[in-house]
Image (cartoon, grey):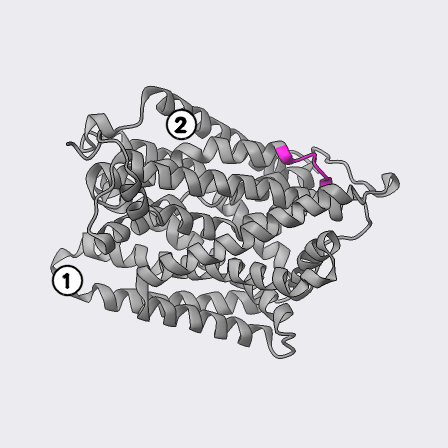
Amino acid sequence: MDQQTRSFRLSGILKSLGPGLVFAGTSIGVSHIVQSTRAGADYGFALIWVVVLANVFKFPFFEFGPRYVAATGEHLLLGYRRTGKWAFYLFLALSLILMFVIQAAVTTVTTGLFSNLFHWTGSFVTLSAIILFVCSSILLIGKYPLLDKSMKVMILILSISTVIAFTAAVNHGSSAQPQLTKPFVWDLTGISFLVALMGWMPSTIDLSVWHSFWCFEKRKQTNYAPSMREALFDFHLGYWGTAVMAVLFLSLGALVMHGTGEGFSNSAGQFASQVVSLYTKALGSWSYPVIVTAATITMFSTTLSCLDAFPRIIKEASIIIFPSKKHWADKVYMIWLMVVVGVSLLIIGQFLNNMKTLIDIATTLSFLLAPVLAYINLRTVTDEHVPEEARPPKWLRIFSWVGIFFLTGFSILFVVWRFVLPH
């Protein structure tokens, strides 16, 4: 029976399950723990529509990653090269623009949580270096199988604790005081935060390429080629679970912090302490060790998967550009792993006490580049080298164009408001 048309089976689902959960573990990081929680804390439930729309309109472009692997047996970066040199090299250029600031941003939040968990009093940059060294060791020794297994455990722990905390917060009721509530205003500050919130909601669109790498590695690990339905089941489980978690994090910020007069600190360590306090206020002080451990593990998983993705992009690109030098690919991966670690630590040192600014820069850049990456994904998955029966259905292609116009419209609105209109 054809791989694209056969129905899924339980055994097939179990064999293909994994890349979607790695996707979720990567996404439920800065966009959720930081940006969604900030949105709820600053504006209550006023921005929940932004979280929902960002997840809905970005959905097709993330779906195209596992769809492409299931259809062709290749990862998406190779698909870009088949679509055209312009798509391949443009993606590499955008990745080089984003990779260091993204890695620095997620590592900063992770370090803040680790310093809170272990009551670290030493240098923040030193702790960041230790975390990145541990992540590098895991990737060089365990590679994808260890990443796959660890992600499943990490995401399960935080998901359960977040659902429990949300339920407790709903039962407790809102802590808002009317005189302290902050309405959302459509000014430069408000629109800038909207763009930053949507930038990584649920994640940056180049994560679709990373996801295709993980799907490709899963096929090699299990020696099993999932059907289209099996591959997309794994994706939907991770993607929509991630969307639900974003709403829960925003709700926690809205119920526990909004209207209390308390704001988030720019310091990563203090910010981490405030996030953990959201849970302990909802659940009680007994939950502190459980929550701080779960949040720390989750951000560690994001740092780990990002650190794997960026050198892997360069590694796979080198194989495509220099096929005769394929035997050097692992060394390329190792070299770029060290480069990403080194440059990220330099950026962390520069933004030591200004974490929110670093995160806003990273998320805003990601959002402004999102329409370009979305278009490349659509072109690739509808290209003639993809089997016709595996291409997106007509409704999904139409919805993809709606999503591209949505992302482009908000990007233009931000640029005009930021650089054209007088302030």
On the image, which quarter does residue 336 sit in?
A: bottom left
User: Which residue carries the number 2 mark?
Assistant: 400
Q: What residue do we see at 20% from left, 56% from top?
A: 319
From this view, report whether residue 397 is shown above or below residue 145.
above
Q: At label 1, which amino acid type do we have?
A: Lys
Q: Which of 135 and 218 is in front in this view?
A: 218
> Which comes sooner in the sequence, label 1 or label 2?
1
User: Which residue carries the number 1 mark?
Assistant: 325
Residue reaching furthest front? 10
Question: Could you tell whether 326 is left or right of 234 in the image?
Answer: left
- For the C terminus, the image quarter is top right
Q: Is residue 365 visible?
A: yes
Q: Badge 2: how crowded within 10 Å, few (<14), some, or many (20+)?
A: many
Regarding mark 2 in the picture, which secondary structure is present there? helix
Q: What residue do we see at 49% from left, 53% from top?
A: 155
Q: Badge 1: how crowded within 10 Å, few (<14), some, or many (20+)?
A: few
> From which residue to which does the magenta span run?
42-48
Q: Which of 42 and 338 is in front in this view?
A: 42
Q: Is residue 86 visible?
A: no
Coordinates of residue 164 in the picture (x, y in percent): 63, 49
Question: Could you tell whether 397 is left or right of 298 in the image?
Answer: left
Q: At label 2, which amino acid type do we have?
A: Ser
From this view, report whether residue 97 is shown above or below residue 54.
below
- For the N terminus, the image quarter is top left
